[in-house]
Image (cartoon, rainbow, N blue to C red):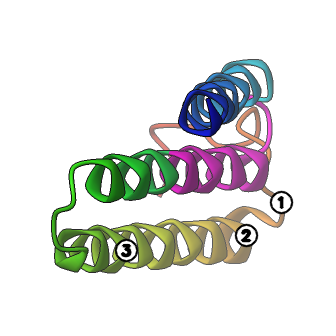
Amino acid sequence: MLTSLYWGLSIFMFLSGVWVFVSKRKHLLLTLLSLEFIVLSLFFSLFLYLNLTNYELFFSMVFLTFSVCEGALGLSILVSMIRTHGNDYFQSFGVLQC
């Protein structure tokens, strides 16, 4: 009974993160935060699955390592965009600008 509640919570977390990702497209920071929330919900689902099947939790540490690398890459893109354009709006970011 409790595991089905956790699975429902992880699905709700994933879908709400996807909804925020789709609806808040104007700011890069909100997009990155919703992507991190999606990664956290996937980690929660992975952790539940590995505990349910009595596997080692080593793969979850590998997943967290890659998610930290993804977060650092997103923050570096955000910082470079703010330094060149002054804000994080996608409307002010032209494809052909250098």
Reading the chain from its start, which is encountered first: label 1 or label 3? Answer: 3
Most common secondary structure along the magenta stretch = helix
| Residue type highlighted by circle 3 | Leu
Q: Which residue is mark 3?
A: 64
In this rendering, would 18 be left or right of 33? left
Position of residue 41 relative to residue 20, above or below, is below
Magenta stretch bounds:
25-41
Give the CA distance from mark 1 to mark 3. Answer: 29 Å
Q: Which residue is mark 2?
A: 82
Disc 2 packing (10 Å; few <14; some 14–19; many ≥20): some
SS type, badge 1: loop
Residue 31 placed where, x, y %?
67, 43
SS type, badge 3: helix
* Disc 1 to disc 2: CB gap under 8 Å: yes
x 64%, y 22%: residue: 15
Q: Which residue is mark 1?
A: 87
Give the CA distance from mark 1 to mark 2. Answer: 5 Å
Reading the chain from its start, which is encountered first: label 1 or label 2? Answer: 2
Q: Nearer the viewer, residue 60 or 48?
A: 48
